[in-house]
Amino acid sequence: MPVPDPAPVLDLIEAFRRSKTMFTAVRLGLFDLLDEAPATAAQLAARTGTHREALQRLLEGCAALGLLSLDDAIFSNTDLARCYLTRGSPRSLSGYIRYSDDALYRLWGELEAAVREGAPRWQQVFGARGSLFDHFYRTEEARADFLAGMHGLGLLSSPALVRVFNLNAYETLADLGGGTGHLAIAACERYGRMRAVIYDRPDVLAHARPHIEASPARERITCMAGDFFRDPLPRASLYALGRILHDWSDERCLELLARVRAALEPGGAVLIAEMLLDEDRCGPLRASMQSLNMLVCTEGRERTESEYRALVEAAGFENVEARRTGTPLDALLARRKQ
């Protein structure tokens, strides 16, 4: 039997090195400094208080990754870095990268223990009581950084999520746990009659309002504060749950879906935006890895189309349709049973 090519195994051995290189460059603010002006390693070391020769290696690593360009000892951002790795870009993922570095990198170090015990590692790693979100929102700076990351991530999917189904029949949208409002904004900008309410914690909604004000649909978008497991939900003809159900067990999902069904108008529907696992649960790769991510972070998991179908039907929905969007999130639409 021929010896298999070791490249896939070698790539996996080294994969975390590439991630940590980018994480560290973002953490040091290198891409933001280079957004101001190209610079040498010595100039950047002086501004960041780092060792010049060590920083040179980090910058060279970023260049090898395609994040920086190097010309006559001067480093510059590539278009990729300028778009996704600088704080000033409207599509920035730098907040999500800092969250990945601060939280996920450490939690994934406990993957073996999570697999042995079948439980998330939040308290073991951070010694924190309360929820994952209590930690992310512990200070105004931490909350702003996390929400900026979620906003950049959301912009990759939300425009596709609101067009894979024809939502013209729905005049009112409630975006549950809507964060900065990227999904509600995308929906109202696409459907000229639609009005939306972004439902989230009051400290989160403060970060949604600037994005609402920047939208041409701003007159049709409002905010409502509350806890979606405890507080009253707004009446609407369409509910959106983006990256919500994957945080929770089946039992908690059913509880939340029952609350959504009760708040929906007759003929209403729920739009679920999540990563869909293949039916054998062995792919797509991004969804499989995200399901492991939920293991170390929360009580939730990623699910297959049939698993989501079973959940929503058990909660009183029917006519379930699923769509792959070609973006980080897929979509399901289910109608409220009469």
Image (tube, helix red, strand yellow):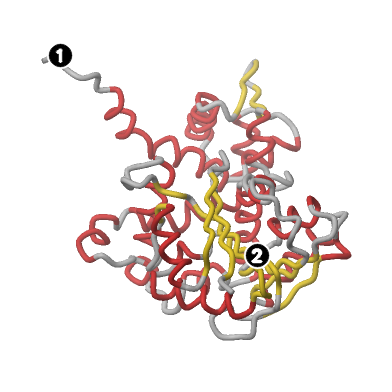
Mark with earlier residue (1, 2): 1
Task: List the residue tagged with mark 1.
Answer: 2
The type of residue carrying mark 1 is Pro
Q: Which of 243 and 270 is in front in this view?
A: 270
For the N terminus, the image quarter is top left
- Residue 131 left/right relative to 33: left
Question: Dot 1: few (<14), some (14–19), or many (≥20) neighbours within 10 Å?
Answer: few
- Residue 275 left/right relative to 265: left
Tell me residue 316's x, y (percent).
Answer: 50, 73
Q: Quadrant of residue 293?
A: bottom left
Tell me residue 325's x, y (percent).
Answer: 57, 42
Q: Is 191 drawn above or below residue 140 in the view shown?
A: above
Q: Nearer the viewer, residue 95 or 215?
A: 215
Residue furthest left in the image: 1
Q: Is 75 drawn above or below residue 2 in the view shown?
A: below
Q: Residue 179 carries which label?
A: 2
Residue at the image point whose x is 54% and y is 53% from the top: 321
Q: Which of 140 and 274 is in front in this view?
A: 274
The type of residue carrying mark 2 is Gly
Tell me residue 242's x, y (percent).
Answer: 58, 60
Residue at the image point whose x is 60% and y is 60% from the top: 271
Q: Which mark is residue 325?
A: none
Q: Which element carries disc 1, helix, strand or loop?
A: loop
Residue at the image point whose x is 39% and y is 59% from the top: 307
